[in-house]
Every structure is written in structure tokens, then in C-alpha cells.
Image: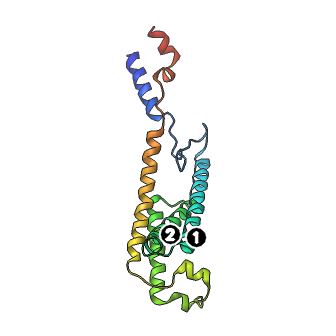
Amino acid sequence: MKRSNRCLRQSWSESTSGFHPFSSGLTLGRLPIGASAAEGRKQMRKRYAAAAAILLGIEVWIALAVHDRFVRPFLGDTLAVILVYLLLRAATRLSVPAAAIAAMAIAFLIELGQLVGLLHMLGLARNPLARVVLGTGFDPKDFLAYLAGGVAAAGMEAVRNRLSRTARPAASTAATAPVSDAVQNT
């Protein structure tokens, strides 16, 4: 009877050791022992904000230096949705699916604003920042890029979550067995 209880305790300990819902991110880092869920959310929000800052730099580089028919129009729009997704995850408590859908919805609304001439309606047609953020011309192919961005953001989260689950080291059975059980078996 004692042996089966020990095995049960060991298997439960092994399955839960090292678990923390916010233990991963860009670096697949671990929180210190005793870290609260609020600290984990704060750490993840910082990681999302850092990733958004890096992606913003890439987007600015694409806007200023790349003038082709694929990277700037398609990849740039795809990355823009991922950027909005990262900002939403950094600033809100939206879930992965909700943030991905919200990021795509924002992009779709901006594209529809281009269709109806929103920049002209708002008197911002000559504002360079507004032209970059809101765009200047409607292209129905952009909807595919926005969809790709939303799917890529959610897919990256799924990969990150899978990697964080496999990166947790398993606890050794000797370390998880109570001393009294170890003494009884000798």
C-alpha cells in the first residue's frame, strides 16, 4: 500500500513540478520560484512589448528601404497585423484568439477606410504619419495578408506554448520521494 502511494505522489509531483502558466516567452525563460500570476503576466507583457518594438523597427525599415512587389505590400501588411496583435497582448488581457481576431478586425477596418477615402474625410490626406498608419489605397489582396498575419500570430503562440511545455525539466524521482518512504524501502 505504501509503495503505491509513493508512486502516486511521485507521478503527481513529476507532472506538476516546474509548472507555471507564464513560464515561457521569447526566451523560454522561467519565473523564480514563488512568482505570482500577476508577476508572470507583467513579465509576459514586457516580452510582448519588446517584440512589438522590434517588429516596429522592422516595419519602419520595410517602409523606408524596401520598394518591391512582395515584401512591402504583402509581408509588410502581414507583419503589421502581428504588430497590432503584440501590442494588444502587451496592453490588454485578451486571449490569443481574441487578440488575433481583434488585430485582423482592426486591419480590415483600416482597409475598408481606404476604400471609402477615410484620410480625405478626416482631412489627413497630406499627413505623412496618417498616410503610413492608415494607408492610401484599397487593395482587396491585402485582406489575405491580414488573414495570414492573424494566423501567423496565433500559430507562433501555439509553437511557443508547445516549446515551453517541452522545455520544462522533469523532476527526479529521488528528489520528490518523501524521506520516510525512502527510509522504508531500504
Q: Quadrant of the C terminus?
A: top left
Q: Amino acid at mark 1?
A: Val
Per the image, the residue denoted by label 1 is: 60
Residue drawn at x 57%, y 69% as measured from the top left: 61
Residue 29, numbered label? none
Identify the element where label 1 is drawn: helix
Give whichever of discs 2 and 1 has the lower sequence position.
1
Q: Secondary structure at mark 2?
A: helix
Pointers 2 and 1 in contact (C-beta within 8 Å): no
Q: Amino acid at mark 2?
A: Ala
Residue 161 horizontal/vertical position (percent): 45, 48
Q: Where 122 falls versus 107 (above or below)?
A: below
Residue 127, quarter of picture: bottom right
Asked if 181 appears above or below 125 in the picture, the reply is: above
Pick the quarter of the image with the N terminus: top left
Residue 184 percent location from the top left of the image: 46, 10
Residue depicted at x 53% and y 65%: 83
Residue 44: x and y in percent read 57, 52
Tell me the tag on residue 80.
Answer: 2
Image height of 16 relative to 181, above or below: below
